[in-house]
Amino acid sequence: MRVVVFEPTGLGDQWTKTGLVDLAGALPGAQMLMDRDGAEARRFGVCTSGHVLVFDKKGRRAFSGGVTPSRGHEGPCDGFEAVSQLVRGLLPEIAQAPTYGCAIFDPNSPCTGKDASCRPH
């Protein structure tokens, strides 16, 4: 498992030294990757904090999206259920779900919108 943490230039530790980042880094087998200025986010078309990507053993994307029912909340969610099923070796009913979080890039950039993919701006 890789945990990718967006790190805007110039903010360093004040951005990445948080309780949530510490929790993610403590997950068994997790590898932390600091994503300077969102290079990895752009590479994978991720525009919103909290976006989860799951790949199968052959490297194919099996799930893309959010795992919370709304921004900043916990509870039952189709995305969370899909990831849980994949982890247990099952085929989920959905392969994508809406992501509720903060825009990683400028909220007015081409990265925002229903079917947008991240593009440098």
Image: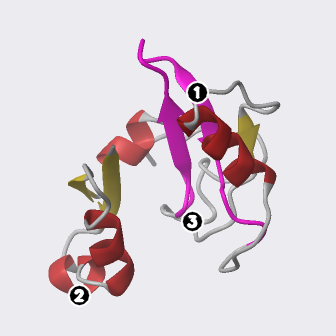
Q: Magenta includes 63? A: yes
Earlier sequence position, callout 1 versus callout 3: 1
Left or right, residue 39 beside residue 74: left
Label 2 or label 3, whichever comes before in sequence order: 2
Residue in the foreground of this view, choosing between 72 and 80: 80
> How would you rate the neighbour count of disc 2 (Cα within 10 Å): few for under 14, some for 14-19, many for 20 or more?
few
User: Measuring 52% from the left and 40% from the top, which residue is drawn there?
Assistant: 53
The answer to whether marks 2 and 3 mark residues whose Cβ atoms lie closer than 8 Å is no
Q: Which mark is residue 109?
A: none
Q: Label 2, on which residue?
A: 14
* Type of amino acid under label 3: Ala
Q: Is residue 42 above or below residue 47?
A: above
**Disc 2 residue type?**
Gln
Name the residue beneath numbered marker 1. Answer: 89
Q: CA distance from mark 1 to mark 2?
A: 38 Å
The disc placed on residue 103 is 3
The residue depicted at 80 percent of the width and 50 percent of the height is 78
Give the x, y percent position of residue 88: 58, 35
Disc 1 element: loop
- 42 in relation to 20, above or below: above
Q: Residue 109 magenta-drawn?
A: no
What residue do we see at 22% from left, 80% from top? 11
